Image: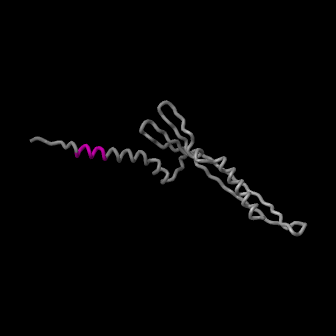
Amino acid sequence: MGENGIKGIIDVTMDKIRAMVDADTIIGNPFVVGDITVLPVSKVTFGLATGGSDFPSKQGNMQLFGGGGGAGVSISPVAFIVINGSDVKLLQIDKNVTAAEKAVALMPELFDKITALFKKDKKKESNPQTEEI
């Protein structure tokens, strides 16, 4: 009986977590300010604890089950994705970011700079300037 009791506790707890947290919690609903679209980005952390035990009943031939479970969820805003035309930027809120998080934040800007460099090189190849002596 304990196996089904623990499974039931876990199932109910996970259903409650799913009801609180979904993909829209991490990347929030966009809001528009003039020509700019802003998407909030959040960090979601959760913990889950479940336990239980079988107990012999006083009637002798039955097993009783007692158990419990609990969960905690933390949602923290960490950044905003700002879209202005074809320009996309990630504005981070937390000042204590790791080097990897900083690198990810700079990727759109770095990509734009590399693309611009390739465009400059193609223009030079297709339009070489000749000097007259």
Q: Which residues are magenta?
A: 118-125
- In which image quadrant can residue 52 be found? bottom right
Task: Indicate whether residue 6 is drawn in magenta.
Answer: no
Q: What is the magenta segment's predominant secondary structure?
A: helix
- Residue lying at the far left of the rendered structure: 133
- Residue lying at the far top of the rendered structure: 34
Q: How is colour applied across the structure in the image?
A: one colour
- Residue lying at the far front of the rendered structure: 61
119 in relation to 37, above or below? below
Q: Residue at x 73, y 58 (%)?
A: 8
Q: Is residue 65 left or right of residue 97?
A: right
Q: In the image, residue 125 lies at what x, y percent? A: 22, 46
Task: Indicate whether residue 123 is drawn in magenta.
Answer: yes
Q: Is residue 106 left or right of residue 19?
A: left
Q: Look at the image and tell me in which quarter the C terminus lies.
A: top left
- Residue lying at the far right of the rendered structure: 59
Q: Residue at x 52, y 44 (%)?
A: 92
Q: In the image, residue 7 lies at what x, y percent? A: 72, 60
Q: Residue at x 74, y 64 (%)?
A: 3
Q: In the image, residue 1 lies at what x, y percent? A: 78, 64
